[in-house]
Image: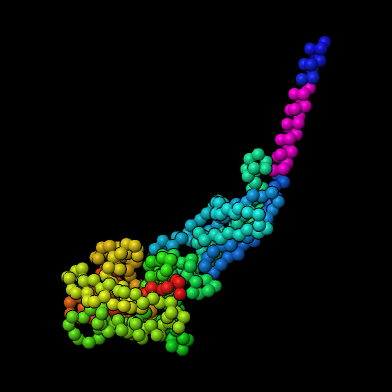
Amino acid sequence: MRGQFIRKALAMLVVVGTVVGMFSSVQAEAKQNTLPIPKFSVKTGEDGSVGITVKKTGDADGYEIYVKGLGKDYVDMYGEYDHLKDEYSLAATIDKSGKKKRSTTIRSLTSGEYTVKIRSYNNKKFGSKTFSDYSDEKKIAVEVSDVIGYSDKYDFSKVKKGDVIEFGAYEQNNDLTDGKEPIEWIVLEKNKKSLLVMSKFALDGVPYHKYYSTDINWSNCTLRSWLDEKFYSKAFNETEQAMIKTVTIENSDNAYDGAAGGEDTQDKVFIPSMFDMTKKAYGFSSDLAARDGKRVCVPTAYAIARGVRAWDEEGVCDWTLRTAGNMRTSESVDRSGVLVRYDIQANNGIRPMMYIDLQS
């Protein structure tokens, strides 16, 4: 009898344990389902960034942000293609870190229309990583400009190599009644101290050297003095002038024929050399004879009015390099992106180059 009683008691304990376990499981599942759905706001920036701010929700350890939508990716200088994201993908994660509000910024989206949703998660409380239900969707429109812009127009801290920035102003549309237009610059190099930039367009038509003379190189040509004096004073205000570094320019001998490059110079504004235009680190082909689309340049309307010749339907031009040739010649980049030698011609475009000081 006593043995039967013990067996029944043990069986009863097993049943009770099972029921308690099932109840606990249901209770845990209920707790998982009550992890709060987060509330969030979205703000798009002029530089194409998307800012997400989440309000702290209960037991959440963090939040996952999902994005889907239609955007565009640029392919090359001749066109673009659509990039469709049919499914939501994880775009960012925010850790709560004990604050009432947490924010993050998404910068990887191209121009287009998107929807955003988020969910909260808890890492340990329920025995494993647990997620809330998804929030309602929010629609956003992203406009990414070719030009990087910030609330402070001289803040280039977030600029990276290959970006286009605005700095200074110069006549470009050839309408002298509406003032100068902002100059666009391609960032070729960036470090903690400075940006190396080159104008996106050919801004003017000025010969390498306006007088007939032998043994002309960058150190003694008239274009150099025009850039460092007239262009510098016209294109930049006092704040911008203070940000332009004076640097030592190495004037190497001509790689084609050994023509002397002349003395190294101290310049604020200059033009690219043959070496610059074959430097892979700047994004150019190392082949002098390559038809490199990244070396192709379009002149402004003002530059055309000043004598720069725009070729073909694409409106591209030849433009001058600072590397000297024989007598009055200098190297140039032609309309197809090939490095060539021309005699001094006013119908070549000029693309200024300079270093912007990030610590001034």
Across and down, in percent, residue 302 comes to 38, 83
- Say above or below: 17 vs 269: above
316 vs 238, left or right, is left
**Quadrant in the rendering for residue 51:** bottom right
Which sits in the foreground, 284 or 293?
Answer: 284
Q: In this figure, what is the number of numbered marks?
A: 0
**Quadrant in the rendering for residue 211:** bottom left
Which sits in the foreground, 291 or 26?
Answer: 26
- Say above or below: 62 vs 169: above
Q: Can the viewer see residue 118 in this picture? A: no
**Quadrant in the rendering for residue 56:** bottom right
Across and down, in percent, residue 100 comes to 68, 58
Q: Which residue lies furthest to the top in this view?
A: 1
Q: Which residue is drawn at 65% across and 39% down?
A: 127
Where does the magenta region start and end?
12-32
Query: In this figure, which colouring scheme has been used for the structure?
Result: rainbow
- Say above or below: 293 vs 120: below
Across and down, in percent, residue 238 comes to 45, 83
Across and down, in percent, residue 141 comes to 57, 64
Q: Can the viewer see residue 130 in this picture? A: yes
320 vs 15, left or right, is left
Residue 93 within the magenta-colored segment of the rendering: no
Q: Residue at x 50, y 71 (%)?
A: 155
Quadrant of image for the N terminus = top right
Q: Residue at x 33, y 70 (%)?
A: 296
Residue 19 within the magenta-colored segment of the rendering: yes
Quadrant of image for the C terminus = bottom left
Does the magenta stretch mainly form a helix, a strand or a loop? Answer: helix
Q: Residue at x 35, y 65 (%)?
A: 282
